[in-house]
Image: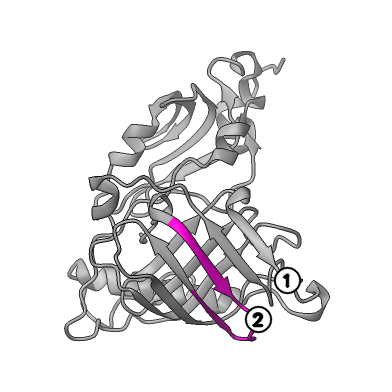
Amino acid sequence: MAWRPHEQLVEGELDNTVPGKVTGWIRFVGMKEMVKLDLIGDFHRDIRGTKIRLSGCARDDEATRQFLEGFSPVQTGEVGDMTAGLPPQDYVAYPYFEWYSEANGRVVLELDPEQVQIIGAPIPACESDPVSREKQQQNMAAFLGGMAQELGLPPGRTICVGAATVSKPLQEGTARKRPHRMQLLTKEIRGKLSPLGSQDSKGGQAVAHVKFFTPDSNWTWWATEFDGEDLFFGLVEGQEKELGYFSLSELQSVRGPMGLPIERDLHWTPKTLAEIAPEMFAGRSEP
């Protein structure tokens, strides 16, 4: 549901030293010009008032270079959630930089902590308020409304659940490319997932550290174990809930009924299988 150019990132700098504005530049593989940002909004409280240096390890191959075809070198619009994942963790617990571009819709960079350098001291958290969730809902609603119109739903009649925002017609001559898939498995999550087979004896007490879902249907996957390469074990909900194996490559390639890619729940906190599906483990004796 967004442009996610993590693998194209070379380097960049974002600046929130002027309240209410985020400016800066980013270099991506596949773009001759340096991308310039001029956005309305603020960082989260953990880095508000600072500059942020971003570093990447982009591969320079044909697939990487083609990924950002159609991406504008001038990014204006609204700041989404931008945080290094440090305390106070208002909404996101790892480096996450999101904005809503007038040219390209939603853009997200999900990074590892070592890819972020903070320059300067943030404004004390007690002196500022968390980023408004109402405003973020409005940004997301406007973005989803534009997507709905691309799918043929009537302009001005699409209302996003959870936000009192009616979608706006796309500007004449504006075209959005198909959303790019998100990074489903970060280095941090890989480190938390148990090796395949290691929770076999735990039953309902096995812990799911990550949740994947289809935005346009009810299919959901909770992973408790991972082989380190491609294969997960965990709980799958489709027509019914059941335990089984599923693969990362499958999740990356599958599309829902409206053509949307599978997403990772960014606000997921680890839970046991018994907490997720108590009806499956009721009456069972736990080890």
The residue identified by callout 2 is 17
Pointer 2 with pointer 1, Cβ within 8 A: yes
Q: Give the residue displayed 21% in from the left and 70% down from the top.
A: 150
Where is residue 129? Give x, y as percent. Answer: 72, 78
171 versus 187 height, above or below: below
Q: Give the residue displayed 21% in from the left and 79% down from the top.
A: 174
Asked if the magenta segment contains residue 20, the reply would be: yes
Q: Secondary structure at mark 2?
A: loop
Dominant SS of magenta comes to strand
How far apart marks 2 and 1 lie (CA) works out to: 9 Å
Q: Earlier in the sequence, mark 2 or mark 1?
A: 2
Where is residue 200? Give x, y as percent. Answer: 59, 15
Q: Which mark is residue 120?
A: 1
Residue 163 visible to an observer of this rendering: no
The amino acid type found where label 1 is placed reads Gly
Q: Give the residue displayed 49% in from the left and 24% down from the top.
A: 228
Where is residue 149? Give x, y as percent. Answer: 23, 73
272 versus 179 height, above or below: above
User: Could you tell me which quadrant the N terminus lies in?
Assistant: bottom left
